[in-house]
Amino acid sequence: MKLNYYNKWNVPLRKNRYFKYCKAIAGVIIMTALTASGSEKKILFFGDSIATGVGASAKNKRFSSVLTRKLNTSFNNYKEINLAVSGSTLIGSSFFKILPKAIAVKPDIFVIQYGTNDNAIGHSSARFLYFYRQTVRKIKKELPGTKVVCMTICPSWNHYNSNFTWLNLVNTGIQEIAAEENVLLAKNFYALKNSKRLFPDRIHPNDEGHKLMAEAVYKAIKNNKAPNSDRIDFIAFSPGEYRIGGYIIELMSSDTVANGGWTVFKGLGSKAFKYKSDYKVKVTTPRNSFAKLPEVSIKHQPKGINVKWHKNTRQAYFTLPITKKYIKVTIKK
């Protein structure tokens, strides 16, 4: 039995045009909401031959496709848009021609994978990092609602003029750019562990390598936590001096540790941080970070750390021991 509701003119509402109109509009609103909740989103890949899938045994095994499928099992329905160009470099046509086309797509996620060919061709680290930062800033300006993901660069061997000095310097720069520009960072180089086994041609990753890359980007997107310039997440490979966020990090070579070791900082800052390292680590803090000699202590090491302080620059200097597990370092001003 149908129930009729009457308005003040004693006209059944089911026969009232206004009632029917409101009912139709309500239906449209509900359907629009349902469609929006399940609407297709776009993830765009901006890169070179690695992003096109060279090295993978099939197109669906390249890291961009593996990542998109993985996202679709956990999040909304993403469509993969791959604008990568084999043999391209960030400096040149990619920045001036492909980037504007990529921005015009208006993706929800914008993944940047560049650097291997820039290293091989011989572009300077300064010039590459300038274009890299400008790329990030241009995307942020044109697409403020888009998530930007920076990927650290893959290793390569005997690829024209490529070398690890450039790679380490630029990967440090990419980590700093991600922190200063407040965008997501995929720790791609660390995920691949500098393993030649994953690069049969010494340039392009195999299926396993592409899978590890996809997992690194997925982790960055899932965590959705952009690095912070006040508390830096930083990964370094092999001994040497690294500069990031005002810090000077010197990884000291050792006869007992091979040159292929790693150092990882979590939340490097002026009050506390965690780290693990295959090397002894000498830390120099940023200028004007301490008005007086600070106290530096490590958990489970009651004697503390010997600290030096320069009164003119107000910088502290201290050395941390080798550790295979994360240790918390506390700094008291």
Image (spheres, rainbow, N blue to C red):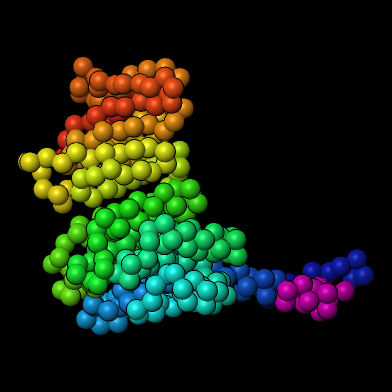
Is residue 235 shown above or below 139?
A: above
**Quadrant the C terminus occupies:** top left
Q: Residue furthest bottom?
A: 58
- At horizontal 21% and vertical 17% (from top left) the residue drawn is 302
Tell me the magenta residue range. 11-25
Is residue 200 shown above or below 324?
A: below
- At horizontal 51% and vertical 67% (from top left) the residue drawn is 108
Residue 119 rendering spot, x and y as whole percentages: 32, 66
Q: Is residue 13 magenta?
A: yes
- At horizontal 24% and vertical 44% (from top left) the residue drawn is 240
14, 70: nearer the viewer: 70
Q: Quadrant of residue 25?
A: bottom right
Q: Residue furthest left?
A: 256
Q: Residue furthest right?
A: 9
Residue 102: tell me if it is visible: no
Dominant SS of magenta comes to helix
Residue 19 rendering spot, x and y as whole percentages: 79, 73
Left or right: 138, with 240 as reference point: right
**Quadrant the N terminus occupies:** bottom right
Q: Is residue 76 magenta?
A: no
Residue 66 rendering spot, x and y as whole percentages: 31, 72
- At horizontal 52% and vertical 61% (from top left) the residue drawn is 134
204, 187: nearer the viewer: 204
Left or right: 7, with 305 as reference point: right
